Image (cartoon, rainbow, N blue to C red):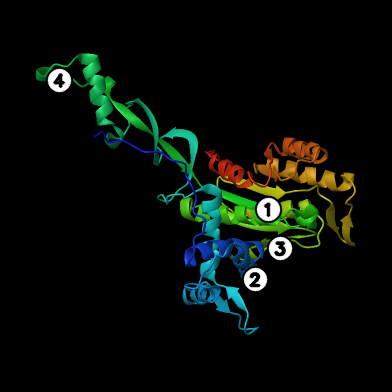
């Protein structure tokens, strides 16, 4: 009887997976959307349970809440008894979850850094081979390729094997570079307007990038700032709690703070990533705030472009991730990008994480 494979249509199980792990995945998503509000996340989870029967008689929502406490994911709020808050363990778990969701599962390498186009006496092997040159280390010689070259060049005579310097091949080394990145996140009111939640995907991207840097590029620096009417720096651990406010968009304040942070970093590579969905509409002046949400205000635009030029002069490229497809705003972003000689992406929310990840990896330049 012949052995083979039997194919049939895939029929998914009617009942969703039950138990702690399946509920925990949903809880981590919900607690991100609710900006760390455990009570609201559990209320939503209860509603989902009513609709989709996520629990059964063997494992209920009460069991899940008890397990969250036992496993150290939530603690009772000391200020308000009966209410829960997430723990540092959960904050890290949210970042890891975002990393896996957006970038896929990444294997942790050795102290990772960004490759550069400069080859030679570097400190990380590449996939490229070249001929041996005087001064190359013996450890860099690839013996399999070199012996193959000798056989091709001098024949297959086992009694008189010949290996010359011209047969030797070595593997190129690539220099690593240390990078300082400032991630700017727009938290103006437009990030939740028109029934579209834009802040949650932006938060997930920030958390995923933070976890990526921590795992794969531990020598790199990542600072996160938010900007509305003003701009201020936030800690990585505060990202799950980030919320949109009743703010205008003070891009100038964000860029000024980003450049101040990068000036303090003694790294060869510096860059700014800016995630926004709108035009700059606000400036801070001695007498208060100058605001204009109607159109692109010349005064606000000119100061923003001046900062883009200032960043270019100190070799800080700005990559703008514009999460809106408004043609009116694209012209401004194109001008801003040209002045800075940076890059711009016009992306929907779905592709935002992939673009940020790819652009971060492509930073392979080094100041020599």
Residue 331, given in percent of the width and then of the height, sits at 80, 36
Q: Is residue 211 visible?
A: yes
Disc nearer the start of the sequence (3/2): 2
Q: Is residue 250 visible?
A: no
Q: CA distance from mark 1 to mark 3?
A: 14 Å
Disc nearer the start of the sequence (1/4): 4
Quarter location, residue 245: bottom right
**For discs 3 and 2, the disc positioned in front in the rendered view:** 2
- Contact check, label 3 and label 2, Cβ < 8 Å: no
Reading the image, the residue beneath label 4 is 161
* In the rendered image, the vertical position of residue 162 relative to residue 355, given as above or below: above
Reading the image, the residue beneath label 3 is 243
Dot 1: element: strand
Viewer-nearest residue: 149 or 24: 24
**For discs 1 and 2, the disc positioned in front in the rendered view:** 2
Residue 149, given in percent of the width and then of the height, sits at 26, 20
Viewer-nearest residue: 254 or 256: 254
* In the rendered image, the vertical position of residue 357 relative to residue 234, given as above or below: above
Quarter location, residue 235: bottom right
Reading the image, the residue beneath label 1 is 184
Q: CA distance from mark 3 to mark 2?
A: 19 Å
Dot 2: element: helix
Viewer-nearest residue: 256 or 66: 66
């Amino acid at each position: 009887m012949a052995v083979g494979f039997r194919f049939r249509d895939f029929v998914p199980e009617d009942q969703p997976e039950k138990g702690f792990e399946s509920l925990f995945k949903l809880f981590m998503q919900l607690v991100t959307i609710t900006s760390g509000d455990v009570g609201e996340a559990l209320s939503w989870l209860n509603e989902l349970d009513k609709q989709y029967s996520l629990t059964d008689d063997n494992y209920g929502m009460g069991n899940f809440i008890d397990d969250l406490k036992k496993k150290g994911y939530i603690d009772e709020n000391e200020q308000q008894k009966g209410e829960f808050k997430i723990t540092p363990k959960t904050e890290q778990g949210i970042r890891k979850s975002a990393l896996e969701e957006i970038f896929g599962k990444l294997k942790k390498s050795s102290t990772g850094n960004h490759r550069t186009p400069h080859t030679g006496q570097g400190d990380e092997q590449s996939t490229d081979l070249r001929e041996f040159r005087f001064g190359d280390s013996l450890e860099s010689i690839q013996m399999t390729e070199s012996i193959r070259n000798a056989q091709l060049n001098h024949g297959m005579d086992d009694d008189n094997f010949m290996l010359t310097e011209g047969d030797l091949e070595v593997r190129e080394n690539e220099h690593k570079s240390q990078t300082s990145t400032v991630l700017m996140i727009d938290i103006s009111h437009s990030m939740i307007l028109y029934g579209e939640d834009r802040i949650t995907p932006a938060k997930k991207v920030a958390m995923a990038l933070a976890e990526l840097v921590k795992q794969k590029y531990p020598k790199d620096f990542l600072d996160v700032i938010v900007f509305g009417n003003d701009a201020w720096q936030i800690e990585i651990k505060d990202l799950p709690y980030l919320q949109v406010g009743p703010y205008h968009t003070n891009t100038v304040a964000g860029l000024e703070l980003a450049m101040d942070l990068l000036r303090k970093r003694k790294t060869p590579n510096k860059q700014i990533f800016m995630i926004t969905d709108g035009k700059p509409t606000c400036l801070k002046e001695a007498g208060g705030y100058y605001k204009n949400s109607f159109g692109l205000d010349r005064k606000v635009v000119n100061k923003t472009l001046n900062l883009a030029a200032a960043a270019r002069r100190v070799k800080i490229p700005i990559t703008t991730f514009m999460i809106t497809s408004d043609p009116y705003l694209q012209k401004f972003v194109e001008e801003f990008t040209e002045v800075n000689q940076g890059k711009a992406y016009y992306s929907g929310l779905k592709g935002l994480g992939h673009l940020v990840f790819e652009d971060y990896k492509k930073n392979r330049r080094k100041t020599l």
